[in-house]
Amino acid sequence: MNSSLHLTFTALWCVVVVLGGLPFSSDAQLDPSFYKDTCPNVHSLVRDVIRNVSKTDPRILASLIRLHFHDCFVQGCDASILLNDTSTIVSEQGAFPNNNSIRGLDVVNRIKTAVENACPNIVSCADILALAAQISSVLAQGPNWKVPLGRRDSLTANQSLANQNLPGPSFNLTRLKSAFAAQGLNTTDLVALSGAHTIGRGQCKFFVDRLYNFSSTNNPDPTLNTTYLQTLQAICPNGGPGTTLTNLDLTTPDTFDSAYYSNLKIQKGLFQSDQELFSTSGADTIDIVNSFNDNQTLFFANFKASMIKMGNINVLTGSQGEIRQQCNFINGNSVDLATTVTRESSEDGIVSSY
Ligand SMILES: *[C@@H]1O[C@H](CO)[C@@H](O)[C@H](O)[C@H]1NC(C)=O
Ligand SMILES: *[C@@H]1O[C@H](CO)[C@@H](O)[C@H](O)[C@H]1NC(C)=O
Ligand SMILES: *[C@@H]1O[C@H](CO)[C@@H](O)[C@H](O)[C@H]1NC(C)=O
Ligand SMILES: *[C@@H]1O[C@H](CO)[C@@H](O)[C@H](O)[C@H]1NC(C)=O
Ligand SMILES: *[C@@H]1O[C@H](CO)[C@@H](O)[C@H](O)[C@H]1NC(C)=O
Ligand SMILES: *[C@@H]1O[C@H](CO)[C@@H](O)[C@H](O)[C@H]1NC(C)=O
Ligand SMILES: *[C@@H]1O[C@H](CO)[C@@H](O)[C@H](O)[C@H]1NC(C)=O
Ligand SMILES: *[C@@H]1O[C@H](CO)[C@@H](O)[C@H](O)[C@H]1NC(C)=O
Ligand SMILES: *[C@@H]1O[C@H](CO)[C@@H](O)[C@H](O)[C@H]1NC(C)=O
């Protein structure tokens, strides 16, 4: 019969379309076992370097999580943030949210060297950033998850997009939500990912307006606990150095836990962008803060899911982009690698917010 023949062809055609579509799909799936055969020890290679550095620099764990976040929000998780200024690249490192505040570039280069020694030309810098974020969470006693892998590195960077896309410490809830929504991240993701501020440090210049002259009112931010206000005013005098550091979580500064949310509930969030989640009247974020405060397991489950979701933003896969040999330069546009090694071992001079 003609009609049954037609059905068979239709069914076959569907199979061909489905199978044929997969390898060319632009949102090809990342896979936690991507390096199973080509670099089976990649996770422990990354972990060993970070664990080592964190013994003398506990702040590095927050710095590495932030590096992945600041990578993903700008043309996707493609290690574009790692590209240095060259004749063809205007580095994202010079964008306002990054300049004098990102840290860990030297640590990423040390990781890359360790990984290249074991498995040359296999592991992308973008995957190193994603692994470093998960490992940092675990080393700070936070949530653990299997990191989907297989990202490739960009051939471009975009400083103006970094200025446009990265949320700032003085953002109100409306702007926070829209910055996250622009990356496909919803309100639950916003509240969960903000919980990364359970570790790390912030520079005075990012919140000093809240202490003396909030929104040009000549008064402190009314959503700042008065005890905490006095503490912070002592750390950050009006007109003092903007680079002085203080803990983002005043209770357990280096432990990844739900104290970030209990701090918000007593008006002890450091940045305006933190406190907005709880102090914006009528906001849908309040219930989420309460639920993460009440149940750390719930916070951890949401944090994992949101980190994986963020790690999927606009990834390059398959034959897109490249595997960079040196994370600060696209291939063929590199400097003498010997110079790089010398610089790596020197002290990181970047003054930092985290
Ligand atoms: C760890 O640090 C020590 C000294 O700081 C150094 O000798 C060692 O090579 C480091 N190991 C790794 C894996 O970075
Ligand atoms: C980054 O900050 C330094 C001061 O530390 C400044 O000289 C430089 O111009 C800034 N870069 C950009 C791109 O604004
Ligand atoms: C940066 O991103 C903006 C906005 O998407 C785009 O218009 C611009 O062409 C990009 N610049 C570079 C150098 O890729
Ligand atoms: C949030 O900030 C934006 C930009 O500064 C401003 O236009 C808007 O009115 C603010 N929204 C609220 C609810 O304060
Ligand atoms: C946010 O997205 C996640 C899935 O990624 C979903 O489970 C959750 O319900 C969403 N939350 C809101 C408030 O839409
Ligand atoms: C507060 O900020 C406004 C606007 O920038 C400024 O005019 C005013 O002098 C500031 N007040 C104080 C006490 O610094
Ligand atoms: C301010 O912090 C104290 C504890 O230091 C707390 O008892 C009080 O409730 C907080 N105030 C507000 C308005 O949350
Ligand atoms: C806390 O959240 C977890 C994960 O969603 C859930 O399984 C557990 O039942 C919750 N615990 C309480 C006491 O509600
Ligand atoms: C890349 O630039 C950073 C400053 O943003 C610098 O610390 C680092 O040494 C540079 N890397 C190389 C390999 O030149």
Image (cartoon, helix red, strand yellow):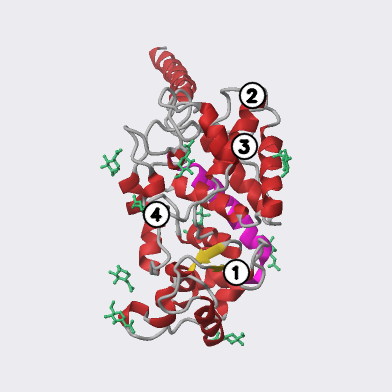
Label 1 close to label 4 by CB (< 8 Å): no
Residue 330 to residue 196: above or below = above
Instruction: Decide which of 1, 254 is in the foreground and name it.
Output: 254
Q: Within 8 Å of ligand 1, the CB of disc 2?
A: no
Check disc 4 and give the amino acid type: Leu
The answer to which of marks 1 and 4 sits earlier in the sequence is: 4
Q: Which residues are magenta?
A: 292-314
Spot occupied by residue 172 in the image (x, y as percentages of width and height) = 38, 69
Alpha carbons under labels 1 and 4: distance apart = 21 Å
Q: Secondary structure at mark 2?
A: loop
The disc label shown at residue 166, or none: 4
Mark 4 vs mark 2: in front: 2
Residue 111, label in figure = 3
Q: Position of residue 62 (x, y in %)?
A: 58, 55
Residue 36 seen in the current view:
yes
Q: Label 2 belongs to which residue?
A: 119
Looking at the rendering, which quadrant does residue 198 occupy?
bottom right
Q: Nearer the viewer, mark 4 or mark 3?
A: 3
Residue 256: x and y in percent read: 66, 61
Alpha carbon separation for disc pair 3 and 1: 28 Å
Q: Pointer 4 and pointer 3: residues touching (CB < 8 Å)?
A: no
- The crowding category of the residue bearing disc 1, from other C-alpha atoms within 10 Å (few below 14, some 14 to 19, many at least 20), is many
Q: Is residue 235 above or below residue 103?
A: below
Crowding at dot 3, Cα within 10 Å, few <14 / some 14-19 / many 20+, comes out as many
Is residue 33 at all visible to an observer of this figure? no
Mark toward the start of the polypeptide (4 vs 3): 3
Do the residues bearing badges 2 and 1 touch, measured as CB atoms within 8 Å?
no
Q: Which residue is mark 1?
A: 249
